[in-house]
Image (cartoon, helix red, strand yellow):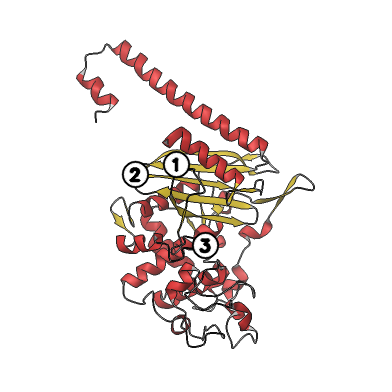
Amino acid sequence: MHTISHLFRKAHYSPILLAIIFFLVQTVGYAQHQSLEDSIYQIMHLRPTVGLSVAVVKDGKIIYNKSFGYKNLEEKTPLENSDIFRIASISKSFTVTSLLQQVEKRRLSLDDDVSDLIGFTIRNPKFPDKKITLRMLLSHTSSLSDANGYFTLDVINPAKNNNTAKCYNDYAPGTDYQYCNLNLNIAGTILERVSGERFDHYVVNHVLTPLGIYGGYNNDELDSNRFARIYEYNWDSSRFYISTGAYASRKKEIEQYVMGYSTPIFSPTGGMKISSTGLATYMMMHMNGGKLHGVRIIKKKHEMEMRKPLSQKELYGMGLHTTTNLIDGETLIGHTGVAYGLYSSMFFEPKKKFGIVVISNGCDQRYEHSFNAVIREVTNVLYKELIQ
C-alpha cells in the first residue's frame, strides 16, 4: 500500500497545493482527536474521575497516548504521560513473565512442587497427597485463598502459623479456580529463590530495562515526583480521599529483609509502578509473542502459554486472561487492576494487532459487564475512534 507521502513524491503537485493537502490531513486528525477527547472528558464529568492516562497500540506502535485530569487533586497538578501509577493486579503478569525466564533457563519447571520451591510445606490439608504446582499458583487453580491474608508468607508457613488450614479451599488443587493474591506473592518469592536476585531488582533488570521502560516495585528506588496520587471516591460525601498506602516507603522492612522470604514486601501480586506509555510498551511485547524491537523477553511458546486459559470457569491463563466483556464483538487478552481507588486495564487483540491501556488514579467505582464503568467506557471510545 502506498503512503500519502509516497504518492506525493510520485505526483507533480505544486508546493502550495501540497501545503493545503497536508493542512487538511492534519486538520482531520486534530478533529478526530478533539472528538475523542471531548468524549473522554464527558465520561469523566458524568462519572466522577480524578485522572486518566491512556495509550492505544495499533500495528506494532503506540498511535495515541494522552493523560486527562489531575495527578494531584489538591494542587490541581495536571496528569502527564510520564507519570507512574501503582497498577495493582496487572503486576501479576510481570511476575509470571519473569518466572518463565527462569523456566527457560531450566532452573525450575511449571510442574514443580511449590513446597520444594518455597522451602516449607504447602499442602491443602483436605488433600495432603495432592501436590500444588507452580502452574497452579500462576493460574489461580492451586486451591489457595486469601482468607488468612497475603501480605506475608507467615500466613501459610506451618512454622509461623497454627491456622494455615484457613488458607485453603475445600476443592482439590488443580480442579477449580479462585482468584488469590497469595498465589502470586508466593510465586514472586520463588522467583527470588531460584534467580538469586531480589525480586524488585530482577523484574527491573530482566523485563523493564531491556524494553526501555521506567518503573518497578520498590517505591524507594523510584522518583516520587512522578507518582500519580491515588484517590478513593466516597459516595456519601461525594468526595475523593487520598490513599496514602499506595506508595508507602518500605525502607524499614527492607533493612531487615530475608532473601527468599520477605518478598511480599514488594507485592509481586500488585505492586508494579509504571506509566501508561510503559505499560503499552510491555503490552506490545506480549502482542508480539514475547519479543519487541529485537529484544526477546520470553520464548513465544511460553508467552502463548500465559494466554491459554487453564480455567474455563474464568478463562484465566497464567497472569493473563481472556474476555469478551470489555468491547462488544472483540475477544481480548490482558488483565485488570484494582487497589486503593486505582483502576487499570491492559488488553490486546493479537490477530488484529491492537491493544488499549487505560489507567485511572481515582474514579467512580461502579461496574458494568464485569469491568469498572469508567475504564470500560473510555476503552470503547478509544476503540471506536482509533481502531474500528
Residue 39 percent coordinates (x, y):
57, 32
Q: Residues within 10 Å of mark 3 (few under 14, many from 20)?
A: many
Separation of marks 3 and 1 at Cα, in angstroms? 24 Å
Q: Quadrant of residue 80?
A: top right
- In the image, residue 8 above or below residue 101: above
* Mark 3 residue type: Tyr
* Dot in front, 3 or 1: 1
Q: Residue furthest right?
A: 237
- N-terminal of the pair, mark 3 or mark 2, is 2
Task: Find the distance from the CA under tag 1 to the CA under tag 2.
Answer: 10 Å
Q: Residue at position x 40%, y 18% from top? A: 24
Q: Which residue is mark 1?
A: 56
**Residue shown at 45% from the left, 59% from the top:** 320
Kindly identify which residue carries mark 2. Answer: 60
Which residue does the numbered mark 3 point to in the structure image?
Answer: 217
* Image position, residue 180 (x, y; %): 56, 68
- Residue 126 to residue 21: above or below: below
- Nearest the camera: 217 or 162? 162
